[in-house]
Image: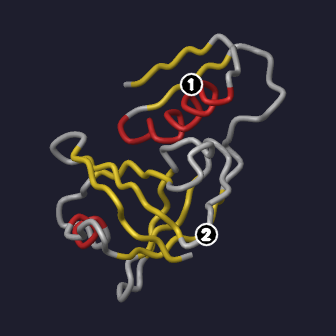
């Protein structure tokens, strides 16, 4: 899928949130990831989707810049309106509908991304479950 960067938010000194609009809906489950590529660069990297699938017009990725990184350095040079390549969604770590037990989410760093998507999804769908989020 072709994606266009619609927004870039500097979340911390080395983390940015990229809002991407695809040429088709992503149709992911909260917690899944995509393979992100840059046109003209023969590399791609996996990134967890950081937004709920209830946001069908876009999806977001939280990405940490790796100093000298072969992928994140050219990615962080991208601007709003630039294109990216997206494959997926992939992965089996996602919130399962019909869950009635308390939800415990544990993550660190940009590992917050899939957990953020899950919490946003629960809120958007009005699913009332006890949720404990531990982020280190």
Q: Is residue 106 above or below residue 55?
A: above
Give left or right: position of 44 versus 11: right
Instruction: Check the picture and name the quadrant holding the C terminus.
Output: top left
Q: Please, what secondary structure does the residue beneath circle 2 have?
A: loop
> What residue occupies the far front of the structure in this picture?
57
> What residue occupies the far right of the structure in this picture?
98
Within the image, what quadrant is residue 97 found in? top right
Viewer-side residue, 88 vs 93: 88
What crowding class fits label 1: few (fewer than 14 Cα within 10 Å), some (14-19), or many (20 or more)?
some
Question: Residue beneath label 2, please?
Answer: 24
Give left or right: position of 34 versus 6: right
Question: Residue beneath label 1, please?
Answer: 105
Residue shown at 77%/15% (left/top)? 101
Q: Which mark is residue 123?
A: none
Q: Is residue 125 above or below residue 77?
A: above
Viewer-side residue, 27 vs 101: 27
Q: CA distance from mark 2 to mark 1?
A: 30 Å
Task: Tell me how the rendering is colored.
Answer: secondary structure
> What residue occupies the far bottom of the structure in this picture?
40
Q: Please, what secondary structure does the residue beneath circle 1 have?
A: strand
Within the image, what quadrant is residue 19 found in? bottom left
- Residue 16, percent across and down? 27, 50
Nearer to us of marks 2 and 1 is: 2
Instruction: Check the picture and name the quadrant holding the N terminus.
Output: bottom right
Within the image, what quadrant is residue 18 found in? bottom left
Give left or right: position of 15 versus 13: right
Give left or right: position of 92 versus 117: right
- Residue 55, percent across and down? 56, 46
What crowding class fits label 2: few (fewer than 14 Cα within 10 Å), some (14-19), or many (20 or more)?
few
């Amino acid at each position: 899928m072709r994606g266009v960067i619609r927004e870039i938010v500097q979340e911390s000194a080395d983390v940015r949130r990229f809002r991407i609009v695809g040429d088709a809906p992503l149709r992911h489950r909260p917690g899944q990831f995509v393979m992100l590529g840059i046109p003209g660069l023969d590399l791609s990297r996996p990134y967890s989707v950081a937004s709920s699938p209830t946001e069908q017009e876009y999806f977001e990725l939280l990405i940490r810049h790796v100093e000298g990184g072969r992928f994140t350095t050219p990615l962080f040079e991208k601007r709003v309106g630039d294109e990216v390549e997206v494959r997926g969604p992939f992965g089996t770590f996602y919130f399962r509908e019909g869950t009635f037990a308390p939800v415990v989410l544990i993550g660190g760093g940009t590992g917050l991304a899939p957990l953020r998507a899950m919490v946003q999804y629960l809120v958007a769908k009005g699913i009332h479950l006890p949720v404990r989020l531990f982020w280190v």
